[in-house]
């Protein structure tokens, strides 16, 4: 379809929005085959088009901001370096917070309850990843005030968030990764101490 559009040389708002929808479809396909880099590239193309044609505060644009940030967060999970992952999650966190504020400031915000719930779930999971159990608990409390059908997929997502949060709270708000890192540092220090002690004994 994109090739046909290019061949015909047509343009305009409706054509650009059609391209954005195709790019969105391609982003979803590449996500399915776990090619996150390509999915992110197409999601960016779609988002930029929606911003240009619909404006930054349009609900469709805001949903695409969310979609892009979630793809970036998935990519961050695969990064081995914690600092690199943290820089990505920091940007995503602020983008998601801005998007949530934008949805809540729209006229008739109750018509966007599913969007708001989705954002709060993902922000809650991000807060759990960061070890911020109080922030995550606050978001869970807010989610409990949103009435959703029992069979809705978001209900299961909220339950998953609560499970992760309870696991975090059992450790006193310390992420498992932080616990492992702390144990690894302690182990290295202990080994270093034994090695120094051994060298001292040899010198004696």
Image: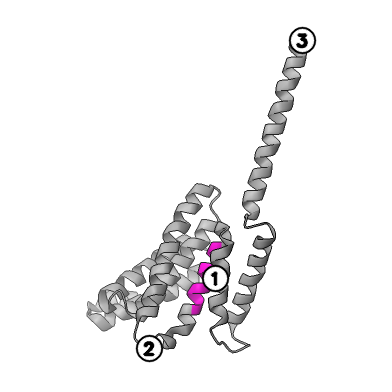
203 displayed left or right of 39: right
Disc 2 residue crowd, few under 14, some 14–19, many 20+, Cα 10 Å: few
Mark pair 2, 1: CA separation: 23 Å
Residue 67 lies left or right of residue 56; in this view the side is right
- Residue 153 position within the rendered picture, expressed as x and y whole percent measured from the top left: 59, 82
Residue at x 58% of width, y 80% of height:
144
Q: Secondary structure at mark 1?
A: helix
Q: CA distance from mark 3 to mark 2?
A: 80 Å
Residue 25 visible here: yes
Q: Quadrant of the N terminus?
A: bottom left
| Relative height, residue 197 to residue 123 (above, below) | above
Left/right of residue 75 with respect to residue 98 in the rendered view: right
Across and down, in percent, residue 123 comes to 50, 68
Q: Which residue is mark 2?
A: 108
- Which residue in the protein does label 3 denote? 204
Q: Residue at x 66, y 49 (%)?
A: 179
Q: Is residue 170 magenta?
A: no
Q: Which residues are magenta?
A: 117-127
Task: Indicate the quadrant containing the C terminus: top left, top right, bottom left or bottom right.
Answer: top right
Residue tagged by mark 1? 138
| Helix, strand or loop at mark 2 | loop
């Amino acid at each position: 379809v994109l090739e046909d559009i290019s061949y015909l040389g047509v343009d305009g708002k409706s054509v650009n929005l059609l391209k954005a929808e195709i790019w969105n479809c391609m982003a979803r396909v590449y996500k399915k085959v776990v090619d996150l880099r390509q999915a992110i590239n197409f999601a960016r193309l779609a988002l930029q088009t929606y911003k240009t044609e619909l404006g930054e505060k349009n609900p469709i644009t805001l949903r695409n901001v969310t979609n892009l940030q979630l793809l970036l967060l998935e990519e961050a999970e695969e990064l081995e370096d914690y600092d690199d992952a943290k820089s990505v999650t920091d940007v995503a966190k602020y983008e998601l917070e801005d998007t949530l504020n934008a949805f809540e400031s729209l006229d008739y915000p109750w018509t966007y309850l599913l969007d708001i719930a989705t954002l709060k779930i993902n922000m809650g999971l991000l807060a759990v990843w960061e070890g911020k159990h109080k922030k995550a608990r606050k978001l869970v409390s807010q989610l409990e005030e949103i009435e959703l059908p029992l069979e809705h997929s978001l209900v299961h997502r909220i339950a998953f968030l609560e499970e992760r949060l309870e696991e975090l709270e059992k450790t006193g708000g310390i992420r498992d990764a932080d616990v492992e890192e702390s144990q690894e540092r302690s182990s290295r220090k202990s080994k270093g101490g034994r090695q120094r002690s051994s060298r001292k004994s040899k010198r004696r």
